[in-house]
Structure formats: structure tokens, C-alpha cells
Amino acid sequence: MRSKNNSTSITALLMPLLFSAALHAQQIPNGDFKKWVDGCPASWYCNNDADCRGKVTQADKLSGGAKLTVMHCFDPSKEDRSNNVSLNYDDLRAKIQKNKKVRISFDYSWTPVSNDAAFVSIDIDLADVRDAAGNTLSASFNYNGNKDGTLKAGTGLQMDCLVNFDPDGRNYNCPDDVMAESIRTTFGIMPGAGSHDVHKGSVLIINHAKFTLE
């Protein structure tokens, strides 16, 4: 017969494991991009093509990171295929408590050729988020204080993205307990203003993608 003390000890051991599992369920899987499967980061989708390999690669074998490089495999005037590069994750779900802030952050380096543009785009689907008056709110992400997810050029930079629950202003505190059914994060390189195609050699490196509630 198991003693009460033994049962208490087992429960005490299990509690940190259960807490860790709950936290893990709210993290972006493989956010350091150290695990790769079939040419893409594990749990992520990238638009590497069979005849244009290398658009998305691991930045460093030890520290991880995802490296997006414009390869120029296709002639956009002749091929119905794009030289744009993208990397995205679609399946993050999380329960958000009232008054919590939702943050997605990552480190990046962006080295453009000509006027190519790098971007992050994040969408969130929430189940019936309403304000105090009962009006339905459409939440959106704010990127380092801006609505535009365009990334500035440089190395060793960081982007903080917060959910804004107020379409007419700024409110980063969740108005009620809600379930985020889907949070979709996309990184990419696209033509800049006035351009029809990206330029060979533009490089975007992403690392340490994190989801936090605070």
C-alpha cells in the first residue's frame, strides 16, 4: 500500500512537469529554428521549391535561426512562380486571461538589396472578444508601436508585437478570458515600392521567436 507521504512526493514531482507542459502548449514550437525536416524548420512551412532549394535554410548549426535568401530561380515574366521568400507558422492556440497582454517577439537581421522589403505579418482569431458594452472587438497586432510589420534594415535587431484589442485606439490588455483559436505568424521578403520582383542576395535571418502572456 502506498503511503500518504509517497503520494504527496509524487504529486510534488508531477506539478512542475504539468506546469511546464501547460507553458509549452503556449509557445511557438521550434522558435529557435534548431530542428529541420525536409528542408524547412520543424513545425513551420517554408516556400522552398524542389527546383529552387536554399531560399530558406538554417542560419547556424549551433545557434539555429532561419535564413531567408532571395535566390532568383524564376523569371516572373515567363513563370507563374514567385521569387518571394516566406516562412510561416499557423497552428498556435492559447487561452488568454483577462487583462493579460499577448506578445510575440523575435530577433532578426535584415540585409536588403536595392529596395526589397522584409516583413512580419501576424493574425489572430479570437472567440467572441467583447468590450464592456458588449460590442465585438476585432483584435490586431501592433509592431513596435506601428500597424506596419515592415522590418528595418540592420543586424541584431528585435521586434515586439502586441495584440491591440481596440480598433480605434490602443488597448493591449485582454478585456475578458478568451481563447485564441489560431495565431498565424509569417515572415517574408517581397518587392519594395515601385518594383515588380525581389533582388537576388537579399537576406533576412530570424531567431528566438517567442510567445508570451504578461
Image: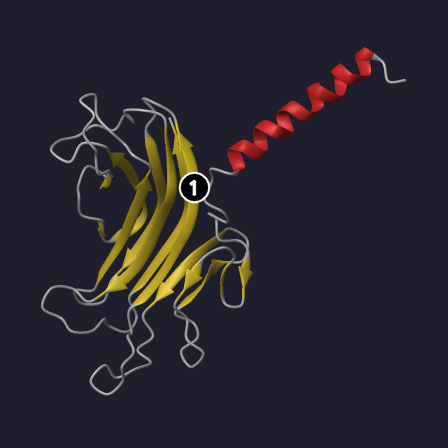
Q: In which quadrant will I find the C terminus?
A: top left
Residue 192 drawn at (x, y percent): 16, 64
Residue at the front extreme, as displayed: 134
Asked if residue 148 is positioned above or below residue 36 in the image, the reply reads: above
Q: Which residue is pictured at 23% across the width and 88% down the height?
A: 78
Colouring scheme applied when the structure was drawn: secondary structure
* Residue labelled with disc 1: 93
Q: Which residue is pictured at 18% across the width and 29% down the height?
A: 135
Residue 112 drawn at (x, y percent): 24, 62
Q: Which residue is pictured at 21% across the width and 21% down the height?
A: 132
Asked if residue 12 is positioned above or below residue 60 in the image, the reply reads: above
Residue at the bottom extreme, as displayed: 78
Q: Residues within 10 Å of mark 1 (few under 14, many from 20)?
A: some
Q: In which quadrant will I find the N terminus?
A: top right
Residue at the right extreme, as displayed: 1
Between 65 and 132, the one lying in front of the other is: 132
Residue type marked 1 = Arg
Q: Which residue is pictured at 15% across the width and 36% down the height?
A: 167
Q: Residue 104 vs residue 15: left or right?
A: left
Residue at the left extreme, as displayed: 194
Asked if residue 128 is positioned above or below residue 119 in the image, the reply reads: above
Residue 83 drawn at (x, y percent): 29, 74
Q: How many marks?
A: 1
Quarter-of-image position of residue 176: top left
Residue 202 drawn at (x, y percent): 28, 66
Asked if residue 204 is positioned above or below residue 144 in the image, the reply reads: below
Between 91 and 118, the one lying in front of the other is: 91
- Identify the secondary structure beneath mark 1: strand
Between 49 and 206, the one lying in front of the other is: 49
